[in-house]
Image (spheres, rainbow, N blue to C red):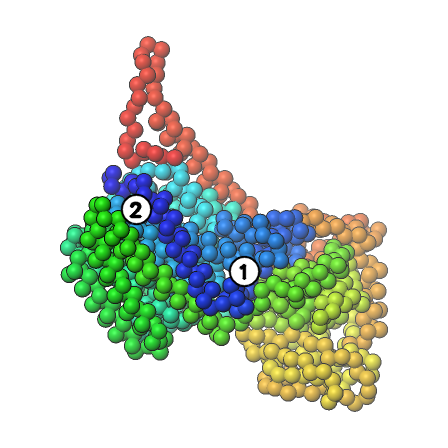
């Protein structure tokens, strides 16, 4: 198996692959004048809404500026579990690099991380190719870059940077598969698996499936090899358990969001996505550089490769492609649930398999005229099939045809460049690299221009962010009071991006209890309930200890405010006669239920008493609403279940008989206008403050509150009762969706948060670590030379499968 060892030329090939990938992406962004090379924002969809804000929060964590720890995020959703978000978005090694950038350059930091991930994926693929088979350094470099520049990477994963950890994971796990096949690296192998699964478990799962298929294609079907492979994966996943288990349970407690059924893409569209400069959200981005595609398509006609290998790799490529189009196997790839968006997330595995198939031919020698002609014919058939798709453009065909022609010329030059003909070899290699870099740069530029026209976009950090962040910092009073960065929101995660402690929160782990509680109180959402918006309302501000909030360009001090911990007279969650308290259909009445007092009038004719504050609430309404003919119109964006319009302030009723006017579409429910009596609100707050905590201390994931002597009732913490809260050593109770604990004459309460699964994950990780250490010790002893007092030292031969074990 000497031919499978990594050759000395590997570092240069890996470096060249990374350089090609980085250059192509940066060149494409520069041509499109996209950030950081121009004014066009790249922060579209979840990149601006989730990933940039989460990386900003990571920056704050690294610099000790979050006001919390690793377990509880006090900034978002009035208190949410942080570890599942870290494990989903931020545990990749490259994410830590944001800490070396200034915080106001967080968008640049995320861009640099994204580009470096693409470069790392290219280098990793070049490495594993050379590890599988010795071959041309130029070929490995170009194919490694082609993998990292596949359509899935530059069109979809570039604005979902956590997915790029899977792009890196696939070649790394294929490298582990090589070690498993040879019986080498039994300690390092599980460590690599663990790093990949911690970085992003979702794409690592897909990468693991792909690596298993590659192992089988490489002749790893023997029971002993399969046993080693299973043990390596299980041990690696066990090492990652402290992160994986809380992430998994966080998903179980999340609001369900959008359920989508799988619809296979049409075959003309599938063919079209093989070509450069195409874009679609619901088809597989199969694009690879023409050089890589030509070499892969030429494999079936390459006589230098054994027929069995040609059949195996051709069958593997076809099988992975077909599995993406068949619902049962589609579900296997996606952990048995169709993704809400981008339903072909496993496409990077297909790209990697195609690249490995191409390398199988290159390692046996550059394909000759017959193979090149056959490969060009296959690609011509793909181009003809793509003609039936609306996704393909004239530029796509021009780039594709030019790339294939250049690739044929490059392969001819490389095939004729023997020893001593460095100039010819370099010319052929450079031309082959151009067939990957140029169309990838063009595809990057094309996608940069298409995304803002199809997706929501968000500005990079600028003056508006700085002004709001400075105002929020200046008003910060946590934990005495919250400062909500308010509305209009810059992103779905403004508390993470600009600071403060708000109701807004957007994550795959948005807890169901908080989505339902905030909605019951009049909150709004987008993304089918996963992206919650700040609620601008005096009653909820009082209940959730909001002392300041950003409103229409100004930081405003709120009026009535309670401390974080208040005491209610009834048993937790019960009403008169022991009946369980439940929210009803009216957000106004639900606020009163949580407050414990009536503060709203709900006029049947839509006209409020003079002097009251007027609020409109119509969750499914889309349009404008205003108070009378001269009031300032407020926009409501309903459309259930995707969007829910938040309760909106309309101003103060100045004259009798002025009614609320609605213009738009959607249901306006009975009781859609609420008239808040500020005097009654002040009285209600004063009653609650009389028995509320006199001192509240927050230390990371622990809240301690000092109560008035002899306090009895239910202490309520103004935070959602997400799974993991314990008070007094027992699971916390719940009061209308908030954390609660009964008190009977006590002087204080103490509640602490521990993410579900943290203890079990730590136990699993510890067990896996002990097994790994035991394996390392056993192997070290097996390799140690034996010696006795009466005999010289004899060095025992190490079985080949254990050589280089650590």
- Describe residue 528's horizontal placement relative to residue 481 as left or right: left
For label 1, the residue is 51
- Front position in the image: 183 or 404: 404
Within 10 Å of the Cα at label 1, are there few (<14), some (14-19), or many (20+) other Cα atoms?
Answer: many
Residue 130 - label: 2
Mark pair 2, 1: CA separation: 34 Å
Q: Earlier in the sequence, mark 2 or mark 1?
A: 1
Dividing the picture into quadrants, the one containing residue 548 is: bottom right
Residue 227 lies, in percent from the top left, at: 32, 43
Q: Is residue 795 above or below residue 390?
A: above
Picture residue at 16% right of the left edge, 60% below the top: 369
Residue 646 lies, in percent from the top left, at: 65, 74
**How many callouts does the rendering have?**
2
- Describe residue 459's horizontal placement relative to residue 12 as left or right: right
Picture residue at 19% right of the left edge, 53% below the top: 416
Badge 2 element: helix
Within 10 Å of the Cα at label 2, are there few (<14), some (14-19), or many (20+) other Cα atoms?
Answer: many
Q: Is residue 503 above or below residue 612?
A: above
Determine if residue 721 is in view: no
Location of the N terminus (image quadrant): top left
Picture residue at 84% right of the left edge, 73% below the top: 679
Dividing the picture into quadrants, the one containing residue 481 is: bottom right
Determine if residue 708 is in view: yes
């Amino acid at each position: 198996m000497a031919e499978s060892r990594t050759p000395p030329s590997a570092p240069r090939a890996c470096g060249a692959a990374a350089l090609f990938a980085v250059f192509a992406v940066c060149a494409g962004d520069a041509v499109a004048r996209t950030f950081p090379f121009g004014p066009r924002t790249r922060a579209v969809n979840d990149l601006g809404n989730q990933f940039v804000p989460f990386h900003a929060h990571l920056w704050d964590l690294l610099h000790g500026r979050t006001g919390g720890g690793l377990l509880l995020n006090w900034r978002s959703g009035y208190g949410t579990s942080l570890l599942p978000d870290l494990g989903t978005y931020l545990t990749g090694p490259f994410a830590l690099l944001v800490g070396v950038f200034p915080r106001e350059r967080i968008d640049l930091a995320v861009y640099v991380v994204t580009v470096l991930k693409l470069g790392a994926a290219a280098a990793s693929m070049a490495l594993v190719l050379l590890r599988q088979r010795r071959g041309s350094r130029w070929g490995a470099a170009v194919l490694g870059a082609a993998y990292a520049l596949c359509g899935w990477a530059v069109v979809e994963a570039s604005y979902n940077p956590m997915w790029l950890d899977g792009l890196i994971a696939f070649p790394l796990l294929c490298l582990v598969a090589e070690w498993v096949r040879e019986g080498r690296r039994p300690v390092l192998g599980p460590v690599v698996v663990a790093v990949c699964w911690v970085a992003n478990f979702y794409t690592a799962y897909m990468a693991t499936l792909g690596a298993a298929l590659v192992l089988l294609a490489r002749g790893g079907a023997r029971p002993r090899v399969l046993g080693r492979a299973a043990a390596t994966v299980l041990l690696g996943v066990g090492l990652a358990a402290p992160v994986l288990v809380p992430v998994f349970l966080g998903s179980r407690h999340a609001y369900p969001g959008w359920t989508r059924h799988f619809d296979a893409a049409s075959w003309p569209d599938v063919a079209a996505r093989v070509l450069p400069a195409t874009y679609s959200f619901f088809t597989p981005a199969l694009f690879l550089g023409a050089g890589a595609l030509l070499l892969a398509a030429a494999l079936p006609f390459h006589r230098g490769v054994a027929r069995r290998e040609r059949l195996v790799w051709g069958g593997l490529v076809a099988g992975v492609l077909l599995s993406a189009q068949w619902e049962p196997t589609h579900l296997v790839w996606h952990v048995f649930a169709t993704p809400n968006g981008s339903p072909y997330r496993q496409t990077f595995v297909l790209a990697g398999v195609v690249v490995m198939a191409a390398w199988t031919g290159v390692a046996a020698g550059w394909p000759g005229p017959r193979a090149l002609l056959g490969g060009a014919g296959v690609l011509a058939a793909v181009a003809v099939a793509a003609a039936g798709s609306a996704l393909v453009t004239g530029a796509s065909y021009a780039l594709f045809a030019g790339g294939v022609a250049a690739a044929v010329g490059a392969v001819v030059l490389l095939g004729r460049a023997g020893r001593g003909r460095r100039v010819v070899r370099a010319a052929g290699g450079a031309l082959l690299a151009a067939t990957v870099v140029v169309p990838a740069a063009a595809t990057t530029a094309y996608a940069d221009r298409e995304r803002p026209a199809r997706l929501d976009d968000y500005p990079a950090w600028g003056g508006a962010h700085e002004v709001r962040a400075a105002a929020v910092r200046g008003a910060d009073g946590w934990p005495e009071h919250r400062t909500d960065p308010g509305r209009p929101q810059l992103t779905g995660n403004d508390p993470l991006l600009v600071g403060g402690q708000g109701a807004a929160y957007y994550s795959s782990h948005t807890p169901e209890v908080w989505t339902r509680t905030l909605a019951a109180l009049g909150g709004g959402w987008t993304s089918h309930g996963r992206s919650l918006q700040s609620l601008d309302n005096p009653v909820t501000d009082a209940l959730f200890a909001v002392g300041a909030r950003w409103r229409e360009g100004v930081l405003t001090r709120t009026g009535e405010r309670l401390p974080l911990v208040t005491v209610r007279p009834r048993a937790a969650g019960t009403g008169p006669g022991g009946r369980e308290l439940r929210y009803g259909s009216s957000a106004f009445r639900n606020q009163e239920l949580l407050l414990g007092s009536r503060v709203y009038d709900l006029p049947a004719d839509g006209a409020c008493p003079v002097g009251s504050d007027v609020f409109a609430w119509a969750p499914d309404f889309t349009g404008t609403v205003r108070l009378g003919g001269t009031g300032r119109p407020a926009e409501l964006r309903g459309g259930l279940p995707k969007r829910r319009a938040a309760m909106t302030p309309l101003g103060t009723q100045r004259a009798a008989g002025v009614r609320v006017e609605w213009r738009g579409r959607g249901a306006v429910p009975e009781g859609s206008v609420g008239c808040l009596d500020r005097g009654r609100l002040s009285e209600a707050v004063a009653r609650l403050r009389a028995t509320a905590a006199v001192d509240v201390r927050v230390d990371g994931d622990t809240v301690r509150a000092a109560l008035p002597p002899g306090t009895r009732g239910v202490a309520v913490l103004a935070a959602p009762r997400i799974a993991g809260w314990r008070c007094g050593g027992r699971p916390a109770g719940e009061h209308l969706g908030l954390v609660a604990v009964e008190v009977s004459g006590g002087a204080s309460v103490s509640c602490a948060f521990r993410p579900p699964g943290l203890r079990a994950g730590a136990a699993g990780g510890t067990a896996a670590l002990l097994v790994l250490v035991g394996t390392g010790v056993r192997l070290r002893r097996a390799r140690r030379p034996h010696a006795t007092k009466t005999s010289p030292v004899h060095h025992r031969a190490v079985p080949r499968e254990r050589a280089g074990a650590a």
